[in-house]
Amino acid sequence: MRRLAYVCADDGVPVFGQKGCSVHVQEFLRASRQAGIAVELFAARIGGTPPPDLAGVPVHRLTPPPVWRVERGGIDDGVLAREQGAIARNQHVHATLAAQGRFDAIYERHALWSCGAMEYARAVGVVGLLEVNAPLLEEQQRHRVLRLRDEADAIVRRALDAAAVVLPVSDLIASWLGTIGVPASRIHVVPNAVRPERFAGPIVPALDAVPGVVTVGFLGTLKPWHGLHVLVEALSLMRRQDVPCRLLVVGDGPERAALERQASAAGLADAIVWAGSVAPADVPAWLAAMDLGVAPYADAEDCYFSPLKVFEYMAAGLPVVASGVGQLPAIVGHDTTGLLCAPGDAAALADALARLCLDPDRRARLGAAARRHVLQHHTWARVVQRVRLIADEAAGGPRVPMSETRDTGAQEVRRHA
């Protein structure tokens, strides 16, 4: 695989932005270039200026959905208009790829309304690789608004059917893919990773330490499923036990106002530092200001992804306290690279955090082991190397379409989402 098209038709992913999904895209592009692959980016949302080392990546803007006015029962329905526009964009994806000549493979970050890239790859006889980060249809129904449910389901299945290889980021997503008929022979789990260079050498912390106070850190978008409300409750319990700690929250999002109200009501306003959203280049300095990292997912059903924050904590040499759900037990070894606790249990989370806050030697031991583990097993260079091998192998072999293996329905999809 020498020439690769990377496609992201998701309007919610600003490829050169600051979100975790943005970092994911940028690191894959960077590692591909370092591996000698001529990669070109096709994206719906650019989101900013490329970092200097990615300025040479050819970027092709996928035309945004047209803003149509749709009325249903006399009411303007903007959601329906956006959904119909996103469906129509598949034709533009197809045409934009075709205009750039032949690629050895087409790699797409799966988007809810996108099937054009994978169907184009199949039509021209090149390997289509579909990275799946979440069961997007079920996620959309649970957390957002969805009008064209049947059409969305059909497009998801078309994309999965057309892909030569499906690359879920976790075992749980791989299991879900199996329940909706994707053959196991086409599924390869490829978790997220880190770039070691980001965490090399002396890094000046972005926040001064407070003598005698341990800094518990959270990195990420403030969304309901990240469990920050449980973390704030755990911090309150620790303060009552006189554990010398503070919380550093690096990131922003829709839950921030509610979390600030919760913290204020609990008398924790002086115990939390809200750093807000920071650029990916600044993340290592903020992690250097932490003594341990926390991933307090509250609901096991929502933890089907491969948390980028956890890999970054570990690369920064931080011990991790995490909920023992989803892919996390496979990443964080209990009392080896961190501590695991029950999801949604503030008391259990407070106990795990307190144990590390009160034991600096244990923090140092677990943090060093965490860094060794992630740099040995979870780097973007290894991810690209593996994807390249998978693509080269897929280029020479037949595959079984979903239509010949599908035997489960929406109920199973929901159960595994």
Image (cartoon, helix red, strand yellow):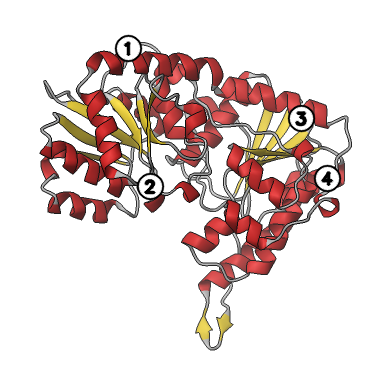
- Disc 4 element: helix
Q: Position of residue 92 (x, y in %)?
A: 71, 55
Foreground: disc 2 or disc 3:
2
Dot 2 alpha-carbon crowd within 10 angstroms: few under 14, some 14 to 19, many 20 or more: many
Sequence-first disc among 4 and 1 = 4
Q: Position of residue 413 (x, y in %)?
A: 63, 56
CA separation, marks 2 and 3?
Answer: 36 Å
Foreground: disc 2 or disc 1:
2
Sequence-first disc among 2 and 3 = 2
CA separation, marks 1 and 3?
Answer: 37 Å
Sequence-first disc among 1 and 3 = 1
Q: Residue at x 34, y 22 (%)?
A: 318
Image quadrant in which you'd find residue 30: top right
**Residue indicated by mark 4:** 122
Q: Position of residue 97 (x, y in %)?
A: 74, 45
Q: Kindly identify which numbered label has been placed on residue 391.
A: 3
**Residue indicated by mark 2:** 298
Q: Amino acid at mark 2?
A: Ala
**Residue indicated by mark 1:** 202
CA separation, marks 2 and 1?
Answer: 34 Å
Sequence-first disc among 3 and 4 = 4
Q: Residue at x 13, y 24 (%)?
A: 210
Front residue of 311 and 63: 311
Image quadrant in which you'd find residue 140: bottom right
> Does the CB distance between marks 2 and 3 fall below 8 Å?
no
Quadrant location, the N terminus: top right
> Does the CB distance between marks 4 and 1 fall below 8 Å?
no
Q: Amino acid at mark 3?
A: Ala
- Disc 1 element: loop
